[in-house]
Image: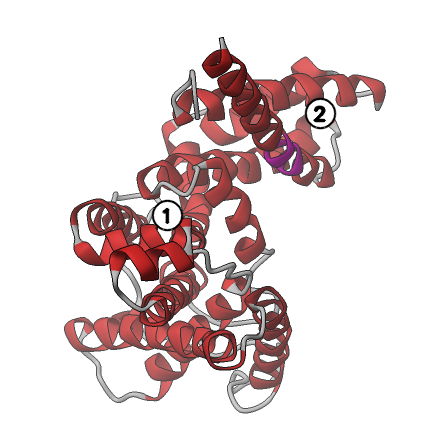
């Protein structure tokens, strides 16, 4: 991006989003000042609100955003993070409930591995169809989302349903399978720190290792990577696809282990889809995903306050999220045009 660093471009996009959202709120009969004040108060009004709501809601977005960013860097359009998230949550719950391991040092790692493995397994289907049969992954990953959602509904209504049989949900997972909290008297759990660790690890891998170079090369041009880099693109695509699915699967189990402590229908409000916005706003940079996930976590946490204090429907918050994406695309395109004009001059 010529002329501005990616962080500055993202800031410009957010400022443009706020300006447009303010105009739309005013047209809709709402006070932009009251609405934005309520949103900021709900997300950042106190240390407890920021830690227990904004960061907690940012955690699944951080992990799914990293999953999408990694896949997109390899030119793999993984739209299936939502399904991979559910697959990871289901696998983790099943292991936590049925595996006879009582100690956290045994059960918790086993469930984390199960969640990641299930996400990777779910991603392996569209990966095989892409590399073996040439089927576009956009359609296959999207359809696999519906399969995962229906599978989750079936399991929580049948084989995994709670012993009481009252609600369509599983029994609570054992205490040994729950992630510990990071700070006392808050809801922030170890999953947020795991997400940051994965972001740092991905950044180092992409920028400091031959494997990361191959991913970036394939993402730039599959054919050029094979010709100039003298390596096959197919194994690189496989690794990126499976790693992306594993991170998304981990996101699902971490949400259960850290917050809900049980699996139920509608576990995710669409984190796997919002993750696309998180990754794009971060320009697919793993470290920037941490910041953009917090931004979207703040929008989610502040949405309830907007509804409660300013009377703004919660769907407006989703509209603001969509405006963020449109603003990013507009700013990016504008910078490209300015860059071309500057090079000509």
Marks 1/2 in contact by CB < 8 Å: the verdict is no
Q: Which mark is residue 187?
A: 1
Tell me if 203 is positioned left or right of 278 in this view.
left
* SS of the residue under disc 1: loop
Residue at 34 percent of width and 76 percent of height: 117
| Residue at the top extreme, as displayed | 345
Q: Earlier in the sequence, mark 1 or mark 2?
A: 1
**280 vs 172, nearest the viewer:** 280
**Which span of residues is magenta-colored?**
321-326
Q: How many marks?
A: 2
Tell me if 120 is positioned left or right of 157 in this view.
left
Residue 239 placed where, x, y %? Answer: 32, 68
Residue 95 part of the magenta-drawn span:
no
* SS of the residue under disc 2: helix
Residue 324 part of the magenta-drawn span:
yes
**344 vs 69, nearest the viewer:** 344
Residue at 18 percent of width and 55 percent of height: 210
Looking at the rendered image, the quarter that the N terminus falls into is: top left
Residue 240 placed where, x, y %? Answer: 36, 63
Residue 148 placed where, x, y %? Answer: 57, 76
Whether residue 3 is situated above or below residue 208 in the rendered picture: above
Asked where in the image residue 102 lies, by quadrant, the reply is bottom left
> Would you name the residue on which mark 2 appears?
310
């Amino acid at each position: 991006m010529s002329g501005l660093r990616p962080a500055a471009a993202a800031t410009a996009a957010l400022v443009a989003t706020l300006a447009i959202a303010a105009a739309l709120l005013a047209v809709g009969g709402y006070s932009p000042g009251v609405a934005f004040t309520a949103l900021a108060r709900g997300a950042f009004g106190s240390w407890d609100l920021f830690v227990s709501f904004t960061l907690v809601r940012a955690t699944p977005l951080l992990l799914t955003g990293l999953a999408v960013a990694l896949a997109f860097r390899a030119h793999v359009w993984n739209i299936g993070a939502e399904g991979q998230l559910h697959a990871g949550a289901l696998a983790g719950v099943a292991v936590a409930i049925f595996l006879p391991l009582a100690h956290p040092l045994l059960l918790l790692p086993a469930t984390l591995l199960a969640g990641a493995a299930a996400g990777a397994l779910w991603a392996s289907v569209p990966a095989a169809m892409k590399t073996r049969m040439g089927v576009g992954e956009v359609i296959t990953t999207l359809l696999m989302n519906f399969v995962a959602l229906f599978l989750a509904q079936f399991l929580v209504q049948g084989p995994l349903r709670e012993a009481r049989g009252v609600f369509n949900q599983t029994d609570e997972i054992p205490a040994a399978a729950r992630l510990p909290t990071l700070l006392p008297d808050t809801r922030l759990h170890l999953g947020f720190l795991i997400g940051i660790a994965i972001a740092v690890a991905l950044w180092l891998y992409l920028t400091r290792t031959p494997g990361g170079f191959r991913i970036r090369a394939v993402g730039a041009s599959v054919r050029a990577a094979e010709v100039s880099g003298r390596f096959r693109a197919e194994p690189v695509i496989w690794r990126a696809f499976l790693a992306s699915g594993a991170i998304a699967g981990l996101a699902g189990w971490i949400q259960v282990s850290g917050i809900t402590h049980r699996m139920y229908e509608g576990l995710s409000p669409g984190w796997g889809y919002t993750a696309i916005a998180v990754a794009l706003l971060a320009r697919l940079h793993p470290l920037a995903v941490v910041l953009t996930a917090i931004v979207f976590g703040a929008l989610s946490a502040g949405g309830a306050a907007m509804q409660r204090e300013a009377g703004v429907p919660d769907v407006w918050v989703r509209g603001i999220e969509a405006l963020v994406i449109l603003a990013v695309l507009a700013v990016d395109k504008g910078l490209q045009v300015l860059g071309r004009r500057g090079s000509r001059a």
